[in-house]
Image (cartoon, helix red, strand yellow):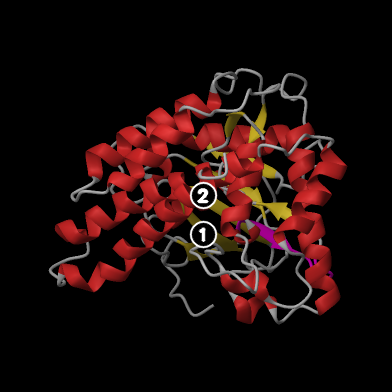
Amino acid sequence: MDDATANDGTTEAPEGIAAGPVTAWLAERTDVAGPLHFELITGGHSNLTYLVVDADGRRWVLRRPPLGQVLATAHDMAREARIIGALGPTDVPVPPVVGVCTDEAVNGAPFYVMDYVDGTVVRDLAAAERFSVEARRTAGTALVEVLARIHAVDVDSVGLGDLSRREGYIERQLKRWHGQFQKSAGRDLPVVDEVHARLAASIPEQGPATIVHGDYRLDNCMLGPDGDVVAVLDWEICTLGDPLADLGLLMVYWADPDDSGPGGMLGATVAEGFPRRPQLLEHYAAVSGRDLSAIDFYTAFGYWKLACILEGVYARYTGGSMGSRDPSAFDAFGEQVVALAEQARSITDRL
């Protein structure tokens, strides 16, 4: 830790952290030995995540909204921490919450702090290959089993019954993301509208609402050395609704070695040992008891939703949010949006 130490005994911190006030706040809630060292782990347009380490080597994780956030975000931080805290006593692996701060005078924005969980986030093939073949096999199985546990949580008993509306989840999602697409799209993409119409006309009947993580995938989980899931991360878009939406999106992100389409947004799972998609589905059906006869719908919805989201990002990039770069530099990104929508359409052909 090479950070310079300020006069108040705290170390200089990255943008987004007021080291002195945050240190004082944390010291009121747990045992800390100053000075604290802060390091940005992940940044971007989503919530920011920082590693916090004290002089004795104890570690925590702090989450706060993006820098320059102009909308009220106290509810967002409190909501995310509430979800993790509610799941703490269940068999869903989540980091223990230390505390939530909604007083913006402390750090300029609301934030919350969790205990640090020691594990690995597998974002690419190189990270996957640091695990044994057996550990990768375990990881695939564990990922499915943890997802089934999330979907088995009694939302009323853990105090999350009022987290959101429960019924009509897919209808609401179709309306939301199609509306976002129509606002952001700066080009003609009729395939997105076509798939929207197909999906809207064939929505499966929703069973009892469960927790829906909203972005469940390998790199939003932390693995232990043997491949077990030791923590599920990034609960910021969690809601209540149709659990099979989570499973469909997992199929979108899960790469099989023989993939020819735009699936497998992360290449890590092509490594030997990881189960293939049909094996994941078979295992989820076995441990959850759910009927997966409509899984093609949810997978198509996952591809389409991701296409809508990425089109918004692409529109911002070509609109200059990345500076004065030539818009053609983002052509490959734009082509990926089309490929995702085309993949969704090809799956809806089977509905």
Residue 63: x and y in percent read 51, 49
Q: Position of 125 compared to 43: left or right?
A: right
Magenta span covers which residues?
A: 220-227
Q: Which of the labelled discs sits on residue 343, or is there none? A: none
Q: Is residue 22 above or below residue 202?
A: below
Q: Position of 4 compared to 211: left or right?
A: left
Q: Quadrant of residue 221?
A: bottom right
Quick one: SS at disc 2? Answer: strand
Q: Quadrant of residue 342?
A: bottom left
Residue situated in front as seen by the camera: 42 or 115: 42
Please count the marks in the image.
Answer: 2
Residue situated in front as seen by the camera: 331 or 200: 200
Q: Amino acid at mark 2?
A: Arg
Q: Earlier in the sequence, mark 2 or mark 1?
A: 1
Residue at figure coordinates x 45%, y 60% from the top left? 8
Residue 336: x and y in percent read 38, 63
Residues packed near mark 1 inside 10 Å, few (<14), some (14 to 19) or many (20 plus) = many
Q: Which residue is mark 2?
A: 63
Residue at figure coordinates x 67%, y 34% from the top left? 243
Residue 162 in view of the camera = yes
Q: Which residue is mark 1?
A: 50
Residue situated in front as seen by the camera: 266 or 35: 266
Q: Quadrant of residue 276?
A: bottom right
Magenta stretch containing residue 27, yes or no?
no
Gap between marks 2 and 1, in whole Å? Answer: 6 Å
- Answer whether labels 2 and 1 touch (C-beta < 8 Å): yes
Residue 79: x and y in percent read 54, 32
Q: Can you say which quadrant of the picture contains the N terminus? A: bottom right
Residue at figure coordinates x 35%, y 35% from the top left? 178
Q: Amino acid at mark 1?
A: Tyr
Quick one: SS at disc 1? Answer: strand
